[in-house]
Amino acid sequence: MKIVHYCQHVLGIGHFLRSLEICKALKGHKVLLVTGGPQIDTPLPPHIREVRLPGLMMDSNFERLFPTEKGASIEQVKQKRQKLVFDLFDKEAPDIFIVELYPFGRKAFRFELDPVLEAIFNNELPACKVICSLRDVLVERNDSAKHEMRVISSLNRYFDAVLVHADPDLLKLDETFSRIGDISIPLVYTGFVTPKPSRNIRARLRRQLEIGTDEFLIVASAGGGNVGAPLLQAVVNALAYIDRGKTVHLYVFTGPFMDEAELDRLHALAGKGVQVFRFKPDFLSYLAAADLSVSMAGYNTCMNILAANVPSLVWPFSQNQEQRFRAERLAGTGMMQVLDDRDLCPDRLAAIMDGTLSQRSRQTGRIDLDGARKTAEWLENWMQSSQRL
């Protein structure tokens, strides 16, 4: 099969990494990963070709859309993107079109998605199946009734199925979207999407990093890095208050989009035992090797934490409910602990970190983390069934 997977990340990197993991699972097929956010350089397997659109992103309040290229005109970028996306479908004639998040989100990108969806619906473009790829929790809306009506209208007109990348035993879509009963197309839970750490990576990486079995490794991270600097600064400052009887190594991952001034501030704060990185493709390996993770609470980070089975403290992004909703649900199962703003005081945070390190406890709950594999299998089986009809 030929598959086009559209993913627009506007602030962090979670949407991109989740989409990439699904694309990786679709090995044996030709996958075109269409991206339109700030560039993220990561190795791709041979069956995936990334198609990069002129970049667009949003501010941390999700109020303003602007080009990633300085000086570029927003209207010119939109016109160019719209033509590129439409021409891609006209040229490639895919069997499946996977749209990440839309129409549940990314309303600002209707300008390039709706013309393609309408043209497929009206047979002006080659026929293909259209799938919505959706995470577990949706953000709240001021005009929720109007928004949900628009979502239902688009889903039932243009789409063939919704794949929700969650374990329904933990989180169900109807907790943040009230009109599930009005969706007339298949809605399928795939399990959460996350890569899995390599076998024995904990011991191998700790040997490589020269971290002894009686020493501690803390990994602090901020997703894409556009937000989260206060958390990372608090962790670095807290290190001075950690029990001095412990040998502690702190690895800080800022994310590729952290502001240069914030990055410089972290480097200035970093003392002995602290290393600061922007991004590593093998971040999951560091989590698996760690004794404690302190992070934001985005989808990908939370699922990485579960896959790595590492004790964790998470500080949810405060701009909307999504991260806190997920984090508190996971905390309720004992799989992580949620930090509040008051916990970012260095001595208070150090006490929490120290207590978690001393417990050396690991997760005991079971969550379905096979979402990428199950997504690929469902698509393959569904397409085979459709062809037999």
Image: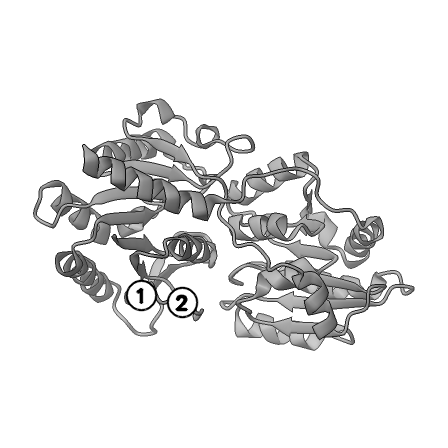
**Residue at 61 percent of width and 42 percent of height:** 327
Residue 56 placement: quadrant? bottom left
Residue, far front? 388
* Res. 214 in view: yes
Residue 338 coordinates in the image, percent (x, y)? 68, 44
Mark 2–mark 1 contact, CB under 8 Å?
yes
Residue 44 coordinates in the image, percent (x, y)? 40, 67
- Within 10 Å of disc 2 (Cα), the crowding (few <14, some 14-19, many 20+) is few
For mark 1, what is the residue? Answer: 49
- What count of labels does the image hold? 2
- 161 to the left or right of 335: left
Compared with residue 110, is residue 71 higher up or lower down, i.e. above or below?
below
- 283 to the left or right of 51: right
In what element is the residue under mark 1? strand
- Within 10 Å of disc 1 (Cα), the crowding (few <14, some 14-19, many 20+) is some
Marks 2 and 1 sit apart, C-alpha to C-alpha, by 8 Å
**Residue at 78 percent of width and 76 percent of height:** 272
**Residue at 45 percent of width and 37 percent of height:** 140
* Res. 270 in view: no
For mark 2, what is the residue? Answer: 44
